[in-house]
Amino acid sequence: MNNYDTTRKGLQRAKRWYQSAIRALEDKRWDDVIYSYEMAIEQAFKAILILYGIEYPKKHDISSIFIQLKQKDIPDNYLGKIDEYANLLKYLVEKRGPAAYGYIQGISKEIFKEDALKLKETVEEVLENCTKVLDLFNKIQEKN
């Protein structure tokens, strides 16, 4: 399997995590929304790193690795968002633990509601842009 195929499958997985987030949003399971957003973004970013041959550690916060994409031939409309997207992942990773295990600490799912609602469009944008990067990468490869 080549980087393109692996990336395509990684983005499909990321989109399934996003579907889980949407179902959780409909059910008002705000903690599950945040957890699923984080997984969707993490999977999408790892897929793009694979596309460009960048190794990453087997951990959730790969934001510091993700910014290495600035040194690659990334489409301009996406290049300008790398720092913003890396910060989004870092933020979601910080929220992921409490979202998953907040019940142990007595954290109510309600504290995640604002982020769950506010970040929906941003997560959609990230997934769309990752898909566009893959499509553009494929078109460039086909020309060469």
Image (cartoon, rainbow, N blue to C red):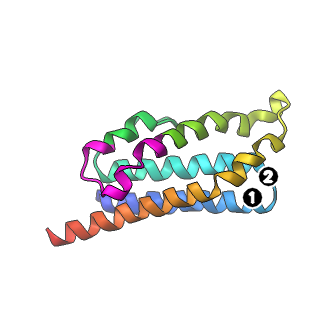
Q: Residues within 10 Å of mark 1 (few under 14, many from 20)?
A: some
Query: What's the residue at 70%, 46% (across, down)?
Result: 115
Residue 28 visible in the shown view: yes
Prevalent SS, magenta region: helix
Query: Would you say residue 89 sits in the magenta stretch?
Result: no
Q: Position of residue 48 (x, y in %)?
A: 38, 52
Q: Which residue is at the far top?
A: 105
- Disc 1 residue type? Leu
Tell me residue 22's x, y (percent): 69, 61
Depth order, front residue of 84/21: 84
Residue bearing mark 1: 25
Percent x, y of residue 5: 35, 63
Asked whether disc 2 touches disc 1, contact meaning CB atoms under 8 Å apart, the reply is yes
Q: Quadrant of residue 134?
A: bottom left
Q: What is the CA distance from the residue labelled 2 to the residue labelled 1?
A: 6 Å
Residue type at mark 2?
Answer: Arg
- Residue sitting at x 59%, y 46%: 38
Say if 2 sits above or below 116 in the image: below
Task: Read off the magenta span.
Answer: 69-86
Quadrant of the rendered structure where residue 143 is?
bottom left
Say left or right for 71 vs 111: left
Q: Which residue is mark 2?
A: 29
| Quadrant where the N terminus is found in the figure | bottom left
In the displayed structure, does residue 62 sit left or right of residue 39?
Answer: left
